[in-house]
Image (spheres, rainbow, N blue to C red):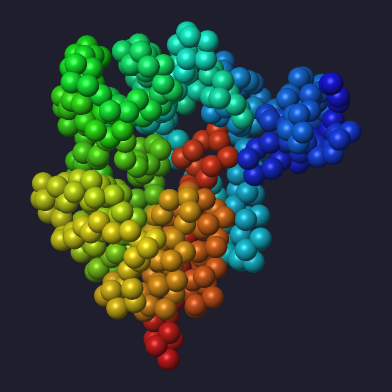
Amino acid sequence: MAEQVIIRRLGAKADGIAESASGSVFVPKVLPGETVTVECDGSHARLVSVDVPSPERETPFCPYFDACGGCATQHMQHGFYQSWKQDILAHTLRQARIEAPVDPLIDAHGEGRRRVTLHVRFPDRAMHVGYMAPRSHQIVEIAFCPIAEPGLKDQAPGIARAIGEHLKGPRKPLDIQITQTQTGFDVDVRGHGPMKDAERLKLIDLASSLDLSRLSIHGDVIVERRPPAILMGRASVVPPAGSFLQATRLGEEVLAGLVTETCAKAKRVADLFAGSGPFSLRLAEKAEVHAAEFDKGSTMALDKAFRATPGLRRITAEARDLFRRPLLTPELNAFDAVVLDPPRAGAEAQVKQIAVSKVPLVVSVSCDPATFARDAAILMSAGYRLERVIPVDQFKHSPHLEVVGILRRDVAKKRR
C-alpha cells in the first residue's frame, strides 16, 4: 500500500530516512525535506513519486538512474552533494572521537571510471546484460554507461554481450570486468569455471574480433594480444588480470600526489598494501621503497615495471599477508615514513605494530571512513597527531569516499 512520507535526513548510503505508519523506512534517491509517496517493504521503501521536491534536486543525467543500482546521487545538486559527502566523513570522525581538520572535497572523477563490471544473467532463458537494480539481482540492461571513460562507456556493454553469447551454453551467471588501459580493453570473466581447449580457442578468436588487449577467465589468461599497460608515474605496469586498480586515472594521480608530497623528505618509505605500485613507483623517484602486498602477481608486476624504468631509486617488493604477518617494530623502525592503502577492512593488525614503532610519519589511504577512523584512533592513542584529513571523491555519484590522513609524531618524545 502506498503512503506519503516526509524525508527527514539522509543516511550514509544516500537513502532518505522517513517515518511511516510501520516505523522508520529508507527511501532511495530522495532529499531531506521532500514529501514523497512510497510503497514500504519492511524497513525499505520503493519511491513511487516525489510530490514536493527539494530545491536541491536536479534532473539526473543518466537515463538508467531510476532503475540502476550503480549511482545513488545524480539527483543531488553539486553543492549539496559535496556538503553531504564531507558530512559523512565528519560524522564518522566524531563517532570515533577524533578531532582533526578536514580539507574540502577533491573531485577526482576526471574522465570517469576506467573499469566497469557488467553482469550476464539468464533468468528467463533469454540473456540479459547490464547492471544490477538496487537491492536486487534483477538486471537493468544498458546500452552505455555515462560515468565511464570515453570509449569504455559506449563499448563495454557490447563486449560483455558478445562474451556472454560465447559462454551462454551452461547459462551460468557471469560477471565481466572490463578495464580501459593504454593499449586497449583488458577483460576478466568470473563465474564460468574451467574451460575446455575448444572453448578457449573460440575465445581467442573472439578476443581478436573485439580487438581486446587481454582476455582472462578468473585471472587465468586465455590470450594476451598486447600487454594491457597502465601508466604509474614514469613507469608502465601490466597488472595481473582482474587485480586491484584505483577507480579513475585522476583519482590515482590525486592520491599519489598527496602521498608523494607528504613523503617528499623521506629517504626510505614502506608502502604497505602496495598493489601493483601506484604509490611505490612514484615514491621511488626520490626515495628507496619497500613494497609489501598480499598478491604475488601484483608484486611481480611492480618489480618488473621498476626494473624497466630508468632513474628510479631501489624498490624491493615482497609478497606478504599483512593481516596475518604485519611488518614488526624492528622492520618498521628502518623507515622514515609508512604508507598504508588497505582494502575496506582496514589495517588494524599492521597499525598496532606501527603504534609501538619509531616511524615519524604515516600516510593512511582508505576507501572506508569507518575503518580509517578506527585505525587512526589506534595511532593517535600511541602519540600520533592527525595533522590533516583529505576526502577524495573518485567514486562520484555514489556514497563511497576515499580518505587520506596524515599522521605525525615527535620521535624523540616517543623514545623518552
Q: Is residue 232 visible?
A: yes
> From the viewer's perspective, is residue 58 above or below residue 366?
above
> Looking at the image, which is closer to me, 392 or 79?
392
Q: Which of the pair 241/226 is nearer the observer?
A: 241
Q: Residue at x 39, y 46 (%)?
A: 254
For the point 86% across and 24% down, the residue is 3
Is residue 120 or residue 140 the one in the foreground? 120
Looking at the rendered image, the quarter that the N terminus falls into is top right
Left or right for 251, reference 197: right
Instruction: Assign the C terminus to one quadrant of the image.
Output: bottom left
Q: Residue at x 52, y 15 (%)?
A: 123
Query: Residue 295 in the image: x percent, y percent?
Result: 28, 49
Residue sticking out furthest to the top: 126
Identify the residue at horizontal 24%, vertical 62% (top origin): 290
* In the rendered image, the vertical position of residue 34 relative to residue 304, given as above or below: above
Furthest residue in direction right, as rendered:
21
Q: Is residue 375 left or right of residue 199?
A: right
Residue 339 horizontal/vertical position (percent): 36, 61
Disc tally is 0
Q: Is residue 283 visible?
A: no
**In the image: residue 311, left or right of residue 256:** left
User: Which quadrant of the structure image shows residue 397?
Assistant: top right
Q: Position of residue 390 (x, y in %)?
A: 50, 54
Check the image and report above or below for 76 versus 257: above
The x and y percentages for residue 72 are 60, 31
